[in-house]
Amino acid sequence: MKPKRLSKDFFARPAKTVAVELLGKKLVHSQDGRRISGIIVETEAYIGSEDRACHASRGKTKRTAVMFGPAGAWYVYMIYGFYYCLNIVTGPSGHASAVLIRALDPVEGRGRMRTLRGGRTDRELASGPGKLCRALDIDKKFNGESATEQESVLFIEDVGLKVEPRQIVKARRIGVDYAGCWAKRLLRFYLKGNINVSKF
DNA sequence: TATACGATCACCT
DNA sequence: GGTGATCGTATAC
């Protein structure tokens, strides 16, 4: 099939649904006419202000404002002073939920990715949220930008890859142990056996 | 104004 | 398994 850019309607659904359905879709950064891309193999859902692991759980701030806006916008933030994490805003406007994209299976522009990642081997290029932002040259300039407009250079495509429910593993989210019972929820999803998944 | 720390990674033992 | 790198943000004075 012809690749089809995901629309706002796709993202305007619950974060958990979007997180599951993003598996097998292709994340694309079109940079100076060249594409850097990979198949999404790992995601996490952050389901709203009631979710104590979600940055929006302490209310609307300058940083989290994007999550309270319409679906289909990128939420990019810096973590530990070194890395960026890429999220896509989901759900209805006013409900602060998002999906963290955690790992990719590199497809287009692997040479460029290797340069951006300091000459690492294929499975180390994008097997983690910080790594994939480096590999796709994503930084905070994308924060608040739309992923669904025709002119967007960072977007997600449906390339017709079918993912069966039995290929999807549900697990606890990574690095949110402080979130009490929310840390135990199975809101992390990844493709079974894929070598690019960050942690098994 | 000051301080503590995080949705990570790479490199060490 | 443990730790250091390094900075924006939130929260406390």
Image (cartoon, coloured by chain):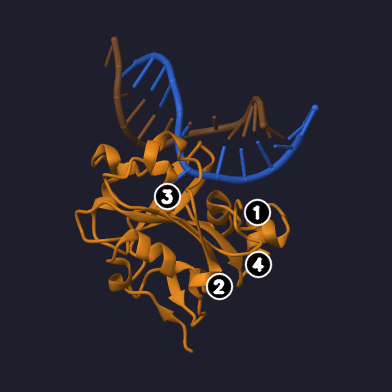
Chain colours: A orange, B blue, C brown
Measure the alpha-carbon separation of dots 4 and 1.
10 Å
* Quarter-of-image position of residue B2: top left
Q: Residue at position x 49%, y 68% from top?
A: A23
Residue A91, picture quadrant: bottom left
Identify the residue at image location x=68%, y=60%.
A123
- Label located before the other in sequence (4 or 1): 4
Residue at (60%, 51%) from the top-left corner? A199
Label placed on residue A192: none
| Residue holding disc 4 | A110
Marks 4 & 1, CB-CB < 8 Å contact: no
Q: Which mark is residue A34?
A: 2
Percent coordinates x, y for residue A161 in the rendering: 52, 80
Q: Which residue is mark 3?
A: A140
Q: Position of residue A79 (x, y in %)?
A: 48, 40
Circles 2 and 1: CB atoms closer than 8 Å: no
Identify the chain of the residue marked 3, using the numbered disc in the image: A
Query: Does the residue at mark 3 contact the one at mark 1 (Cβ under 8 Å)?
Result: no
Kindly indicate whether the residues beneath marks 2 and 1 are on one polypeptide chain: yes
Q: Which x, y percent locates residue B1?
A: 34, 16
The amino acid at mark 4 is: Arg
Mark 1, Cα crowd under 10 Å, few <14 / some 14-19 / many 20+, is many
From the top left corner, tell me how far across and down residue A118 is, in percent.
69, 52
Compared to residue A181, the image places residue A11 above or below, namely below
Label whose residue precedes the other's in the sequence (2 or 3): 2
Circle 2 residues within 10 Å: few <14, some 14–19, many ≥20: few
What amino acid type is highlighted by mark number 3?
A: Lys
Tell me, yes or no, whether dots 2 and 4 are on the same chain: yes
